[in-house]
Amino acid sequence: METAGIEAVFLTTHNWGKAAQFFQALGYELDFATDHNSGQLRNGDGPYVFIAEVPEDQEPQTRIVLKVPGADAFRPGPVAEVVTPFEDTHYGTKEMTVRDPDGRLWSLQAPAKN
């Protein structure tokens, strides 16, 4: 089984409100906001953007999340180093992290139940 395109872009920021306003100014609509300075925005049928606020001493990060139809049937090729195998998340998916040959981390997200 292969990945099925880009599912999402995960961003961390020092200011959730300003980051959300930035994406709204670009045409994204707020799907939901949490009570801990994070939330999800969408623009049409494309990948969603999830933004979470982090403390000032943490560097803001960007991670692209690739969609996997099913965690049980997915096996990355040998050039993808598995950093963490699929694990259940608190938001109802399974997530795996792999490292590419240049050292970048990629998230792979599958439904919690196949």
Image (spheres, grey):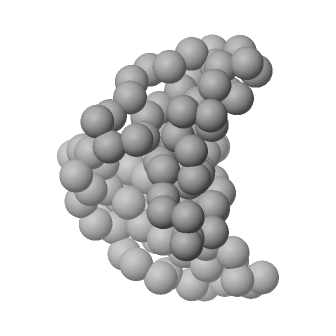
Where's residue 108, x and y in %? 49, 58
Q: For residue 63, what is the image quadrant?
A: bottom right
- In the picture provided, is 43 more to the left or to the right than 33? right
Residue at coordinates 70% horizontally, 83% vertically from top-left? 103
**Residue 89 in view of the camera:** yes
Inspect this view and state whether residue 106 appears: no
Q: What residue appears at the point 43 percent right and 52 percent down from the top-left corner?
A: 109
- The location of residue 101, given as percent across then percent down, is 74, 83
Q: State whether residue 80 is above or below residue 106.
A: below
**42 vs 105: above or below:** above
Q: Which residue of the protein is positioned furthest toward the front in this rendering?
A: 56
**Residue 32 located left or right of residue 64:** left
Asked whether 14 or 28 is in front, the reply is 14
Q: Where 48 sits versus 30, above or below? A: below
Residue 51 horizontal side relative to residue 24, left or right: left
Q: Could you say where residue 73 lies in the image, as x and y percent from the top left?
A: 37, 60
Residue 70, given in percent of the width and then of the height, sits at 36, 51
Going 63% across and 37% down the picture, which residue do you hit? 19
